[in-house]
Image: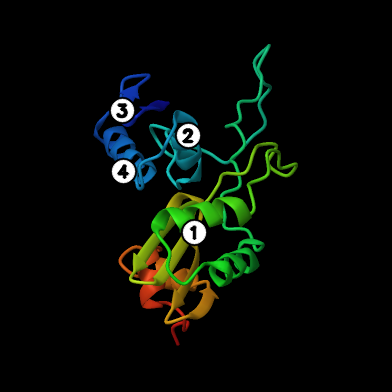
Amino acid sequence: MACLSALGAVVSAACAAGDTETDRVAEQVAAQIDSPPQASAAAYARKALETDLGFNFRGWVSGPSRRDCPAGATPVNPPPIPLWEVPDGFDPALQTVLTGLPAAVTENDVLAALARSMPTPRSFNPDTQTADRAPLRDVALRGDDVGVAYRAGDRSTGGIDCLLGSRVNGTMLVWRPSWAQVQPGELTCTGETALDRQGVTPPP
């Protein structure tokens, strides 16, 4: 079996003598699990399990068959993945924050209002057996106009989850761009995007 270890960057190491084919497979798996870069060795292990490539020197030699487990064998499972999303409850909370802001605000005013009023991630999620991961936050000001963005997820978690809200010329708007609109190379989930009110209308 060819092995891959991940410590910050992907390093491929052969556990047994290989050949040009195993080198090709290892390089291809390394490229797949490093796009995007992962945050831990466990995350790299998950990505490797998701690839459609095996580490067998010869590929499928025969059909599947039953084998006894070695004595003392224990299952090896990556640790659970924290839920990383922008929860539904963020939408009305963000609308309330934007509505309650004074006419003239500073970035610190907005950050303080968000800290007071926005929901906090669950410290324990029974579905994942972990604490939920908080979405990333971004704030932008343009005069008295305010833009706020909450972003969660990436390509390794199935896409970007984005919530945008803005107060422009005294009018409040909170919306979620479609998944397609926040793919790499499309809209960025930022306070500036919220100020410009991009992604309000889903693509046809």
Task: Give how far across and how far down residue 182 sits, in percent.
Answer: 41, 67
Judging by the rendered image, the residue that carries numbered circle 3 is 11
Distance from disc 2 to disc 3, alpha carbons, whole Å, reads 12 Å
Few, some or many residues within 10 Å of mark 1 (<14, 14–19, 20+): many
Local crowd size for mark 3, using a 10 Å CA cut-off: few (<14), some (14–19), many (≥20): few
Cβ atoms at labels 3 and 1 below 8 Å apart = no
Q: Please say whether residue 160 is visible from this viewpoint.
A: no
Pick the residue in front: 131 or 73. Answer: 131
Query: Which of the image's four quarters has the C terminus?
Result: bottom left
Disc 4 marks which residue? 31
* Most distant residue in the right direction: 126
Pick the front one: 161 or 22: 161
Residue 6 visible: yes
Tally of marks: 4
Q: Secondary structure at mark 4?
A: helix
Residues at marks 2 and 4, CA–CA distance in whole angstroms: 13 Å
SS at circle 2: helix
Q: Amino acid at mark 3?
A: Val
Tell me if label 2 and label 4 are in contact, CB under 8 Å. no
Q: Label 4 vs label 1: CA separation?
A: 29 Å
Label number found at residue 45: 2
